Amino acid sequence: MKKIYFFVAITCWLMGCRNDPSPLNNAGPKISEIREKEKLLMAFLYNKQGSVTEIQKYFDDGRSIWESWRYEYDGSKVVKQEYWSSHPLYLSSWPAPGKPLLLQWVTRYEYASNQPYPSKVITYSMSKPNEISSYQLNSYDKSGKLLKSERFTPNGQTNGVSVYEYDQRGNLLFWGGSYWEYDIHPNPLNKLNVPYWDPSWPSPNNVMANFSLDANGNKTNVWRYEYTYDAVSGFPSTYKRYIDNKLMAEGEYIYEP
């Protein structure tokens, strides 16, 4: 679940938190970049309608693109996602700049009638682009929160089930063996409204901790985040990331004017 480039998001345990949430400013600015050491870490590209068309992840040099997620729409609905990478996930060597981006897989999203959220997710690997690699069926509650994802092989055999748990604000609390804690400020990544590998992105607040629990219920592999916030929008301006209380990175959020 954890990745070395997991940069964002996440000191108040919300199930027992007494602070009332501040109003979320959904009309706030769009995020355009995330930088660390003044070097570009991620870039967010938009079309004229304001929808995200591409998310780019950069190497430490801040110039070379490591990964790219590209999106196509039917109106406001995402119908296709392409994942491009300079280093396929099956490679054992540590990624380094210098290789071109190659299309790794394509994901298509199908919607039930009058449903704004995808009910079926179909993935195609570029090794066999005309054959379904896997598919997923999603279940939602009335407010649109994803409750369960059932994954299947191309021939319909069950390949796994994921269950999602949320707090009263709609923040993701548990998924895939990982737990999250949040602040009470608006999350700029929530505004993107696109699928991505980090399941906490749709949460309305910013992740302040991401961790696992051992057999005794103690937190392990704790990723912790501290933020400063914009006084007007309430969105985070800068962050510090700690892993097991060791400072690993400092970064800033850049927003469109």
Image (tube, rainbow, N blue to C red):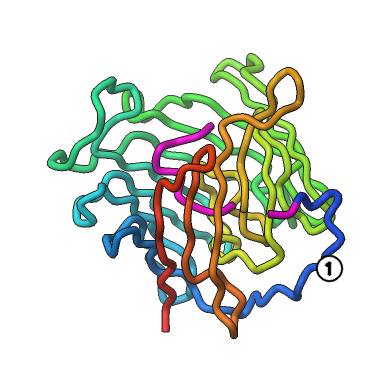
For badge 1, the amino acid type reads: Asp
Q: Residue at x 23, y 56 (%)?
A: 62
Does residue 218 appear to the left or right of 61 in the view shown? right
When the figure is inspected, residue 223 is found, relative to residue 194, above or below; the finding is above
Residue extent of the magenta highlight: 1-12
> Which residue is the site of mark 1?
20
Does residue 17 appear to the left or right of 86 in the view shown? right
Q: How many residues crowd mark 1 within 10 Å: few (<14), some (14–19), many (20+)?
A: few
Q: Residue at x 33, y 30 (%)?
A: 126
Is residue 3 at all visible to an observer of this figure? yes
Q: Residue at x 20, y 52 (%)?
A: 61
Is residue 137 at all visible to an observer of this figure? no
Viewer-side residue, 132 vs 220: 220
Viewer-side residue, 48 vs 238: 238
In the picture, which quadrant includes the C terminus?
A: bottom left
Q: Position of residue 203 (x, y in %)?
A: 66, 55
